[in-house]
Amino acid sequence: QVQLVESGGGLVQVGGSLRLSCAASGSIFRLNTMAWFRQAPGKQRELVASITRLGFTNYATSVKGRFIISKDNAKNTVYLQMSSLKPEDTAVYYCNTAQAADSAYWGQGTQVTVSS
């Protein structure tokens, strides 16, 4: 059974930090490149960061140098450490496999709001 449970969002001021967590099903976590996505109101979902099974990471240009994706294989959990947050980072954040389609199963996401 697919499980993706995001947590850690909240309201933060500009320049602040948050750490998001995503508990994933073991099979999904072990076999795939995992990623964090975000969707702002009125915009399409976009890939923010990804991490391969071997731990190689990749970031969207807009978050490079500010966000760090990591994972704990023993806990089947993916993290997103977000720093120097900006108002444009405000969105619902989701985790999934990096290749997940819109029609795939998605968790409930976690809301991140950055106030100026």
Image (cartoon, grey):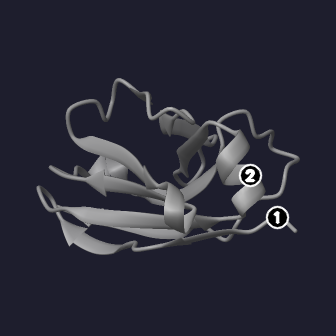
Farthest residue to the front: give it: 74
37 sits to left or right of 27: left
First in sequence, mark 2 or 1: give its number.
1
Image quadrant holding the N terminus, namely bottom right
Relative side of 38 to 5, left or right:
left
Q: Position of residue 65 (x, y in %)?
A: 20, 32
For the residue pair 10 and 49, the one nearer the viewer reads as 49
Point 60% across, 49% down: residue: 42
Query: Mark 1 sits on what residue?
Result: 2
Q: Secondary structure at mark 1?
A: loop
Mark 1: which amino acid?
Answer: Val
**112 lies above or below 98:** below
Residue depicted at x 80% and y 44%: 102
Quadrant in which the C terminus appears: bottom left
| Among the 4 quarters of the image, the one containing residue 55 | top left
Residue 73 horizontal/vertical position (percent)? 51, 56
Residue receiving disc 2: 28
Mark 2 falls on what kind of element? Answer: helix
Q: Quadrant of residue 14?
A: bottom left
What is the CA distance from the residue labelled 2 to the residue labelled 1? 8 Å
Q: Position of residue 11 (x, y in %)?
A: 29, 75
